[in-house]
Amino acid sequence: MQDKESFFINQFPSTHIGDDGAVIDGTVYSKDLFCEDIHFKREWMSLEQISFKSMLVNISDAIVMNAKPRFALLGIKIPSDFTPRQMEELSKGFLRAAKIYDFEIIGGDTIGGEKLDISVTLISKSDSPVFRKGMIENDLVAYTGSLGSVKRDLDSLLKGEKISKESKFFTPKLKADFFYEAAPYIHAAIDISDSLSKELSRLSKINKLGFAFKQNIKEEILCSGEEYEILFAFDPKNLDKLLKISYKHNTPFTVIAKAVHGDYQTKCLENHF
């Protein structure tokens, strides 16, 4: 059987499903869940860190579609023993993200429960969205930043060890400025939430192409999830333009493959614990 996420999504026949967000008349709608004991443990992060990250992982979806957030709706299951001070701390992360990325939180819903679960719906605008579909044969395929540290840090946390306060597990480093300028030169893109290998398989499936890799990629890079870097495909003739943009925004990227006839299947297990 295919993975449960794909199986469930396939029960709904909408043509708008299949990207990081659904594009309707220039508006991009995206939603992410951020759940205790699946995406985080409260002993690892402050409440402000948790709410801030819950926003960033959704904003990442908007960025990779060349969309800018405008409004957000929140759905929160709040532990019944939370104090007013804890709820204020939780709100700070949401408000900080809204201030940095210039959007408004316009409502939502709350219920009580045992664990902290957060649902974010983001409404963004784009004049020229970038989709997962669009990669063509001989395109170069690259990813921003570096990969592997999040899986290492998650493994350390699961063993009860401390990790750096600067870890991307706590605070993803989004590449908005780079991508908004680079978007006109990019054929297809996806954010790396479930691992480089999983996102490559998604690009392969939707574009009906495989990859000729330029080097062997270590498993720790292929299988590290929740990196929130950007995987993108582009015409080789635009490489110099993209390198100049990457230098301008201090956003290095690594070219790993060329799009070719064939397919690619993920080699990694699911990342959430």
Image (cartoon, rainbow, N blue to C red):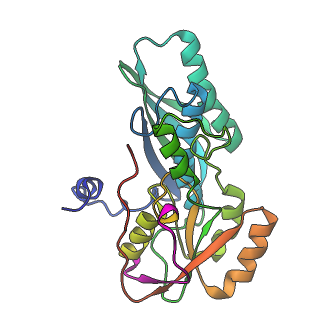
Of all residues, the one furthest to the right in this rendering is 248
Residue 91 percent coordinates (x, y): 58, 24
Q: Nearer the viewer, residue 51 or 255?
A: 255
**Residue 237 found in image quarter:** bottom right
Q: Quadrant of the C terminus?
A: top left
Is 33 displayed left or right of 128 in the figure? left
- Compared with 140, 16 (above or below) is above
Is 246 displayed left or right of 53 in the figure? right
Residue 147 percent coordinates (x, y): 58, 60
The residue at 30%/59% (across/down) is 14
Residue 95 visible: yes
**Residue 96 found in image quarter:** top right
- Compared with 263, 59 (above or below) is above
- Compared with 266, 37 (above or below) is above
The residue at 43%/61% (across/down) is 19
Magenta stretch holds residue 215: yes
Q: Nearer the viewer, residue 66 or 257?
A: 257
**Residue 11 found in image quarter:** bottom left
Q: Quadrant of the N terminus?
A: bottom left
The residue at 49%/27% (across/down) is 42
Magenta stretch holds residue 34: no
Residue 125 visible: no
The residue at 49%/35% (across/down) is 73
Residue 238 percent coordinates (x, y): 68, 83
Q: Nearer the viewer, residue 268 or 265?
A: 268
Residue 106 percent coordinates (x, y): 54, 32
- Compared with 57, 23 (above or below) is below
Q: Which residues are magenta?
A: 207-220
